[in-house]
Amino acid sequence: MPIICLPGLDFHAFWQFWEDDLEDIADLRGIIVPQAVYMDAIRRDAKDYTGYLNDSVYFKVNGRLGVSVASARLGKLDGLEDPDAKHTFFRTSQSSLRILWPGYKKWSIQIGKPARGSVLTTAELAVLIAAQVTKFLGYGTKKNLPEEKQNMKKDEMGDWNLRHFPLDCIYLLRLDKRGAASWQPVLSIDPSLAKIPANKVL
């Protein structure tokens, strides 16, 4: 079993969900990936990162927070709560999805607004974001590593090396709005399905 370290306030962490008044922290699936919280130039000055969580979409399945990325990308959403709830994802012709996976370069992708308009349902968002997370994981090779890690062997690349986390162990918990056209997914991993060495620290 890996050792778990608690991240700082500028990172995704389980205590953010206590503030959201979930009944029990046990509602969370797995260990939250401690991504740095993305802030655009305007919001970065405010320094109150948790204050922007009012523009968030939650993904709950059968009473527990978290939808499997592997299932959602295939449209398998059995048990997803409020699948038809509507959310304004596009305020311009495109939105950016940003992932700041620990140990890797910042990653973003532009998503163009579909013909049907700016509003997507919870189910549509789950499928869309899961597809983009899958693209990120496929990109998580040496070309997406910081320069100082380019020549490291795979076992030296860091505790959050993407090779440790097959797609079926990753969950999408929440989607946070982080700017006028920027969003960031809150992700978790199921350590029982991950390939993490026992002596690694997460």
Image (tube, helix red, strand yellow):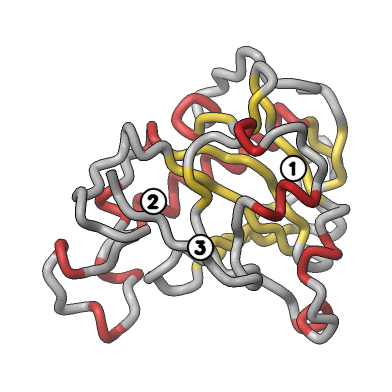
Task: Name the residue nearer the viewer: 110 or 64.
Answer: 64
Labels 3 and 1 touching (C-beta < 8 A): no
Q: What element carries label 3?
A: loop
Nearest to viewer (mark 2 / mark 1): 2
- Residue drawn 37% across and 58% down? 202
Q: Residue furthest top?
A: 78
Q: Where is residue 135 shown, x and y percent of the image?
A: 44, 49
* 151 is higher (above) or lower (below) than 82: below
Task: Name the residue nearer the viewer: 71 or 102.
Answer: 102
In primary-sequence order, the first of circles 2 and 1 is: 1
Query: What's the residue type where badge 1 is placed?
Result: Pro
Task: Name the residue nearer the viewer: 122 or 92.
Answer: 122
Q: Is residue 72 left or right of residue 84?
A: left
Query: What's the residue type where badge 2 is placed?
Result: Leu
Q: Is mark 2 on a helix, strand or loop?
A: helix
Q: Residues within 10 Å of mark 2 (few under 14, many from 20)?
A: some
Q: Which label is found at residue 114?
A: 1
> Could you give the CA–CA distance between mark 2 and mark 3, rounded to whole angstroms?
24 Å
In primary-sequence order, the first of circles 2 and 3 is: 3
Q: Which label is found at residue 6?
A: 3
> Could you give the CA–CA distance between mark 2 and mark 1, rounded to whole angstroms?
24 Å
Q: Is mark 1 on a helix, strand or loop?
A: loop
Task: Name the residue nearer the viewer: 12 or 90.
Answer: 12
- Residue drawn 62% across and 39% down? 128
Q: How many marks?
A: 3
- Residue drawn 17% across and 69% down? 156
Q: Is residue 74 left or right of residue 183?
A: left
